[in-house]
Image (spheres, rainbow, N blue to C red):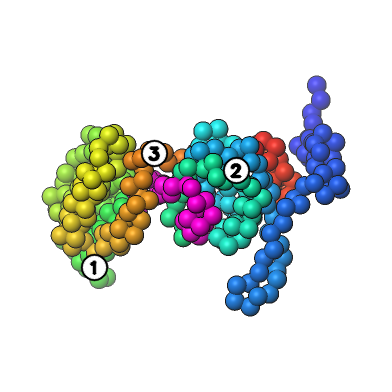
Amino acid sequence: MYNLKPKYLYEAYRFALSEYEIEKEHGTWDNMKVERVDEQTGEIKKARTVYIAKQENIGSSMCIDDKEINGKSFTIMSNQSSGRIAFMMDSVQGHELAKGLKFMGEALNNIQTVNCDMAPSYLKLIREELLKAQVIIDKFHVMKYVYDAVQQVRIDIRKQVIDQLSQGQRRKKDEGLLSELEQLKKSRSCLSRSKELWSEDQTALMIELFVKFPLLKNAYDLAQQFKCWYDKKNSFKSFLQINKELYSWIELLENSKIDSFKQCSKMILKHEQEIVNYFKNPQTNARAERINGKIERFFSNGYGTKNLDFSIYRIKGYFA
C-alpha cells in the first residue's frame, strides 16, 4: 500500500491533473481585470481580479457576502437555490464591484431578490447596479444587532456591580457582589435564546437575575418581542399590519429609555424597507454563510492555501 505525501498529491493535481498551468499559460485564467483608481487622487493602482463570473449560475434569488482568505477580502455572490457561486472578486469596495459585475452581462436582470448584511458598500451596489432586484437584509444580522443591545445592558450592569466592590481587602458584602458577577457571566448565552431553550438550571438563574435587575428583564423581553415579530410565520399578514407592529415595538424601545437600544432603533428605521422585505421572500443569508464554511473545510481538507491563486482556481472548479 502506497503512502502518498500531501505535497505530492498537491503538486500532482496542480501540475498534471488540473488545467491550471495550461490556463495560466494561455491567459484564460484570472484574465478578467478591473482597473483600480484612487477616488481622491485619480492614481491608477494594481488591478482587481474577477475570478468567477458565471452567468449560468445566476438565479432569481441571490445572496452576497464577504470572505477573507489569507488576509485578503473577497466578495462572493451565490445562488440561493443551487448554492453555486456566480461571482467572486477580490474586493469589497462598491465602485470596484460595480465594474466587476459588468462581466455578468444581461444575466443580472434575472435577479429579483438579493440577501445581504448591512454593509453600506453592498447595499449601494445592489441599489445602483441590480436595478430589478429587491434588497433583503439578512435576518440573523438584524437579530444579532438587537441581541447585542441586550448584551450591552448586561455589561453595563456588570460594571455597576464591579464599582460596588471594596477596594483592596474584600469584605462580607463583596461575596454577594461576586456571586452576582458570576451569574451575569453565566447569563450571556441565555440572553440570546428563547426561554423555551433554557435548561432547568438556566431558568432558575434567569428568574433570580431578572428579579435583581429588572432593566435586564426589560431588555430581554424587548428582544424576544422583536424576534416574534420577525418570525416567517407572520408572512401571511398584510404589510400594513407588519409595519404597524414594528412601529409599536419601536415605541416600546423609546419608552424603555435603554441607551443601548437607541442605536438599535435608528438602525431599524434606517433599513426599515429592506428588513420588512423579508416577509415578501423569507430567505436569509444562511446559504452564503454555509458556502463560506464549506470553503474553510475545503481548504482544511486540502492542507491549507499554499498558493492563493491556485486555491481560488480550485474554488471555481468545485463551487461554481
Res. 161 in view: no
Q: Say whether residue 82 is magenta.
A: no
Rendered location of residue 177, percent (x, y): 20, 58
Near-viewer residue (192 or 320): 320
| Quarter of the figure with residue 9 | top right
Kind of element beneath mark 2:
helix
Label 2 is placed on what type of residue?
Ala
CA–CA distance in space, label 2 to label 1: 60 Å
Kind of element beneath mark 3:
loop
Mark 2 or mark 1: which is in front? 2
Q: Main secondary structure of the magenta part?
A: helix
Q: Which residue is drawn at 80% across and 46% down?
A: 28
In the rendered view, does 227 fall on the left or right side of 79? left
Kind of element beneath mark 1:
helix
In the rendered view, does 190 fall on the left or right side of 24? left
Q: Name the residue under label 3.
A: 281
Q: 10 Å neighbourhood of mark 1: few (<14), some, or many (≥20)?
A: few
Q: Name the residue under label 2.
A: 107
Q: In terms of sequence position, does the residue under pointer 2 or pointer 3 come before the other?
A: 2
The image shows residue 129, relative to residue 115, as above or below, that is: below
Rendered location of residue 111, percent (x, y): 52, 43
Label 1 is placed on what type of residue?
Asp
Rendered location of residue 23, percent (x, y): 82, 44
Magenta segment, which residues?
A: 121-145
Label 3 is placed on what type of residue?
Asn
Please identify the residue farthest to the bottom as the structure is shown.
41
Near-viewer residue (297 or 253): 253
Q: 10 Å neighbourhood of mark 2: few (<14), some, or many (≥20)?
A: some
Q: Name the residue under label 1.
A: 163
Mark 1 or mark 3: which is in front? 3
CA–CA distance in space, label 1 to label 3: 48 Å
